[in-house]
Image: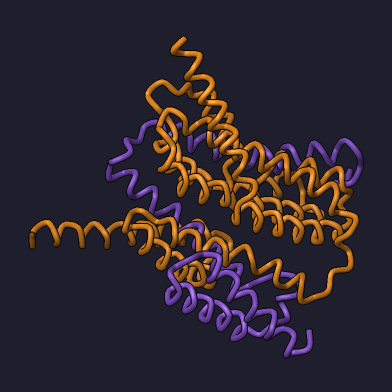
Amino acid sequence: MKSDENDQSSVVWFLTGMRGLFSLPAFILMLSFVGFCSLTAQAGIPPQQVVFMTGMVWALPAKVILVSSMMSGASLAAAFLAVSLSSVRLMPMVAALIPELRTSRTPTWLLLFLSHFVAITAWVFAMEKVQAVPRDKRVAFFAGFGITLVVANMVLVAIVYHFVANFPPIVAGCLFFLTPIYFLASIWHSARHPVVYIALLFGLLAGPLFYWLAPEFDILLAGVGGGTLAWAVERLRRRRREIGA
Amino acid sequence: MTWHDGWWAYAFIAIAGWLATDIWRWLGVIAGNRLRDDSEALNWVRAVATALVAAVIAKLILYPTGVLEQSPLWLRLGAVAIGAAAFFLLGRKPAIGIATTIATLAAGLWWLGF
């Protein structure tokens, strides 16, 4: 009886997660996917492959790199390496999210399955919203949001692909710019730890710096270097305050 | 064989796309399972994850592809600065910051004859 009630409320939280499809982040991501559609259409990649890619890869930056590798005729090994390097960031993102989602009884296989639905948008959304969800319902909530978002974008890509070829340049430019601006605003808005503000600023500066120093590994170096520095600065500030108090 | 030959395209996407991304997600689950949610190690992971995403943001703004590649840098940075000012002055609502930035960019592109 008790466990029945519990299952029922998991379904309710799954549905609450699904409703996240009608939120600003999901809307902006879908606009970004419209932009991605116009990129793949110009590259001449057939729509079935674009839908397949959307479901299988999911992370938008990784897909952009995959498409550019395919267009330049890169070998499988070279494409694998380029996409892998661009996706290393998924590891700390997932590692930061998992302690927020799981309880001591959450099976690891379930977390492995759900990790597929993590990309920047779902990560930012989950890190922000999950605080208001009871801990034992967070996995259901994230599953509802993550799975719905992937499926909705696969459908979107299948439909929109045929219409994007001739967008006016201003529209195409604004669609492209939505993604970074949305990430910026929502990370600042959803930060609950002081270290996030510092890491955001350091990452913004370290990105171009390492692009200039070592363009092949820029994102990785900016993340580890800028992030570690941000962590050290914030820790020092915390220590000072503890001593001062 | 090239990527557009039927089944090979799907195999290519599965290996170079799906496997190359999900490996990192799985490693993230394994690492995240060992982190306590109030530990100093998690604080560091959080900082690195945020800085990585921030570096992607900076790259998209400074080195865009497509139409924006031809747009001047001052317009893109100016749009972000005006959007940030609106965000901080008007109650820190993401929608306000995003709408202001995009409106500024659109006006600038139009004015420059895009």
Residue at 83% across / 74% down in the picture?
Answer: A168
Residue at 68% across / 86% down in the picture?
Answer: B108
Residue A55: x, y in percent? 72, 40
The colour style of the image is by chain
Residue at 45% across / 74% down in the picture?
Answer: B90
Q: Is residue B94 above or below residue B13?
A: below
Residue A148: x, y in percent? 66, 39
Depth check, front residue: A80 or A93: A93
Image quadrant occupied by the C terminus of chain B: bottom right
Residue B95: x, y in percent? 56, 65
Image quadrant occupied by the N terminus of chain B: top right
Q: Is residue A228 above or below residue B42?
A: below
Residue A135 in which image quadrant: top left
Residue B23: x, y in percent? 58, 36
Q: Is residue A32 above or below residue A140?
A: below
Q: Colour of chain B?
A: purple
Depth check, front residue: A95 or A155: A155
Q: In this view, does A132 lie above or below A179?
A: above
Residue at 50% across / 31% down in the picture?
Answer: A139
Depth check, front residue: B63 or A16: A16
Q: Colour of chain A?
A: orange
